[in-house]
Image: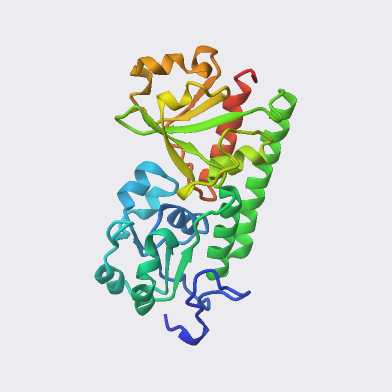
Amino acid sequence: MKLDRRHFLLAAGALAGAPLLARAASQPRVITLEYHATEMALALGLRPVGVADAKGYARWVGYGKAQLAGVANVGSRQQPSLEAMARLKPDLIVGVDFRHASLRGLFNRIAPTLLLPSPELDGLASVYADYRQFAQAVELQAAAERDLVRLDQALAEQRAALARAGWAGQPLAILQSIGGVSQMWAFAGNSVPGGIQKALGLTGPWLDTPARQGVETKTVEDLLTLQTSITLLSDGRSKLVQDPVWQRVPAIRAGRMSELPAGLWPFGGPASTPRLVHTLGQALLALKPA
């Protein structure tokens, strides 16, 4: 696959209406270095030639994991192997700025590189922007737009259902347990769950303040004055329910907590995000608003 490198735009985010690579007859050889980039490739029908932490992707995200059988592992997301990446002769490398900005120059010596930006204000908006940017880079915009229409529909359906049930404007705290400890992540306004809350017409205690990568670490004691319903994402290893203070949290005492099933990925992706929207909406409909 011979491509004219003069047409490549090497700066992430500087697409300026043009793809990062000129499409050839066969699929481009793409390496993905972050979970949501891997999910985007698979959603677009692209089987990456290399993936960072494929085992972790299969465990935490799971979408299309069968398609990764036999795909080369290029190391961890934090420290991908340049040698392994170079051996694969990729046409495009896709990473994220908060992990890979310092490696951009080295990546660009291997292949054109797209680094997706960290969400600043709204993680849900970043799901749309990242997917469109990736799709534009490989000239599969129409496929991406079809997926995003389905996300629009999921948001509209759940927002309408929640409004009918009296949830409009109600406060909600979305948390994710951290396995093995009595701590959790609280999703801020620039996270994907925070963006979903706003799109569903909900309010929340942390939606006005952005956080690094969209999450803040909280203890059970931090929740004792929290007068909101709670939605908890858990992988089943949490020790929260064993903490005696947990039973004193107002939402727990009032029966206003929903625990979402394991296997939901809350950090973006065109397949994971609609699933999270639907599951969250259905969980809240099973509760009475405060």
- Compared with 156, 227 (above or below) is above
- Compared with 9, 238 (above or below) is above
**Left or right: residue 213 compared with residue 107:** right
Q: Residue 2's x, y, as percent?
A: 43, 84
Which residue is at a point 57% across and 41% down the rendered structure image?
194
**Left or right: residue 230 compared with residue 91:** right
Q: Quadrant of the C terminus?
A: top right
Question: Is residue 69 visible in this depiction of the protein?
Answer: yes
Q: How many numbered marks, from 0 up? A: 0
Q: Residue 263's x, y, as percent?
A: 42, 36
Q: Residue 213's x, y, as percent?
A: 46, 49
Which residue is at a point 42% across and 74% down the rendered structure image?
91
Q: Residue 83's x, y, as percent?
A: 25, 71
Which residue is at a point 51% across and 54% down the rendered structure image?
43
Q: How is the image coloured?
A: rainbow
Question: Is residue 138 visible in this depiction of the protein?
Answer: no
**Left or right: residue 23 compared with residue 51:** right
Front residue of 173/81: it is 173
Q: Quadrant of the N terminus?
A: bottom left
Front residue of 100/164: it is 100
- Compared with 219, 45 (above or below) is below
Which corner quadrant of the image does residue 201 belong to?
top right
